[in-house]
Image (spheres, rainbow, N blue to C red):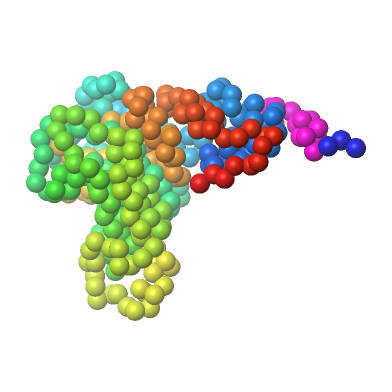
Amino acid sequence: MANSNDQLATFPPELLIRIFCHIDSIKELLRVSCTCRQWRSLILDRWFQQYRFREFARRHLIGHWKFEDTNKLGHDSSGITKDRYTFTGQPRQNTCFLGSCASFDDRSSIDIPVYDLPLYQTDHFCVAVWLSTSRMAFDHRTAVGAWKPDNNHWLHLGHSNYFKTENQVIISPALVQYECAGGTFGTNQWFHLVVLVSRLKQSLYVNGKLANTVDMSQYQNHSTVFKKHLITKEMITNWKEEKIQRPHTLHIGAKSFGLNFWLGDIADLSVWNCHLEPHEIEAIYEQKVTVDKVNVSDYVLNKMSRVSPPTEKLPSVN
């Protein structure tokens, strides 16, 4: 009778590749690579790793703005938002190290309705963006926002009035706000910000490194409560059941219509309905290319090279 490794070897590589591409978590892929030598060889292949990331983006990238067409500055290359954008003011195209970017003059934004797009009506998402400003203002400035009163506060990414990189999330009809602040935002230089949001926590990466994580599973970790009269003991006890609000309109260059405009440039904005992993965030920052051109294979393979081969004990992946 054939042993299990012989049976595993009968799977065609083409089928295995298609299956492996649907494993989003690098931790799970590391475990799978320890099954047998054939699987490990496929997973450790550079071509496969790059193909897997392209497939990952095809499934989970729900908005991508590269600002390459001056006549269609709000064009979403993912196709999900169907270019239903409008302008507030006059955002314009500019050039940067990535090629193209959008420039905002403190009174302009690109406004995209997403209230009727199911992929955006989620509490598990990720936003990555390059930002630059030539002049700091002593108040909040929002590069990417979805913050419509009273029930559509979803995203508030930019810098605070203390010049800190920051994102904000609001939970429940009581408008309980959680702030996740990172390092100091500076002038005349590009910063790469990535925020990962889920119901229980949000994490902020600045220039490829984790800057802060905020636990939102506990009520007392909030920064502000706007409607304290709606807070009850039962709500606090069952806090995990309260929901993150959902977006109505996504604003590039503003918090909402006419509020907290960005002053500076924005490049390569991507929105995902899942979380990028730390090695992917690092690769995007280090390679300084748009997310559709990033090569993640070396970062994945460096991580996998530290994992024991299939003949040894299955490693513990933290």
Q: Residue 217: give x, y in percent of width and height.
A: 39, 63
Q: Residue at x 61, y 30 (%)?
A: 43
Q: Is residue 61 left or right of residue 5?
A: left
Q: Please say if 195 is above or below 304.
A: below
Q: Please say if 299 is above or below 257.
A: above
- Choose top left, top right, bottom left or bottom right for residue 282: top left
Q: Please say if 44 is above or below 85.
A: above
Q: Magenta segment, principal secondary structure? A: helix
Q: Residue 150: give x, y in percent of width and height.
A: 27, 62
- Choose top left, top right, bottom left or bottom right for residue 270: top left
Q: Residue 309: give x, y in percent of width and height.
A: 64, 32
Determine the residue located farthest toward the right in the rendered image: 1
Give the number of marks.
0
Between residue 146 and residue 179, name the one nearer to us: 179
Q: Write down the region rendered in magenta.
A: 4-16
Between residue 167 and residue 306, name the one nearer to us: 306
- Choose top left, top right, bottom left or bottom right for residue 103: top left
Does residue 81 appear in this view? Answer: no
Q: Residue at x 79, y 30 (%)?
A: 10
Between residue 178 and residue 55, name the one nearer to us: 178
Determine the residue located farthest toward the bottom in the rendered image: 233
Residue 11 among those drawn in magenta? yes
Q: Is residue 269 left or right of residue 257?
A: right
Q: Residue at x 24, y 70 (%)?
A: 227
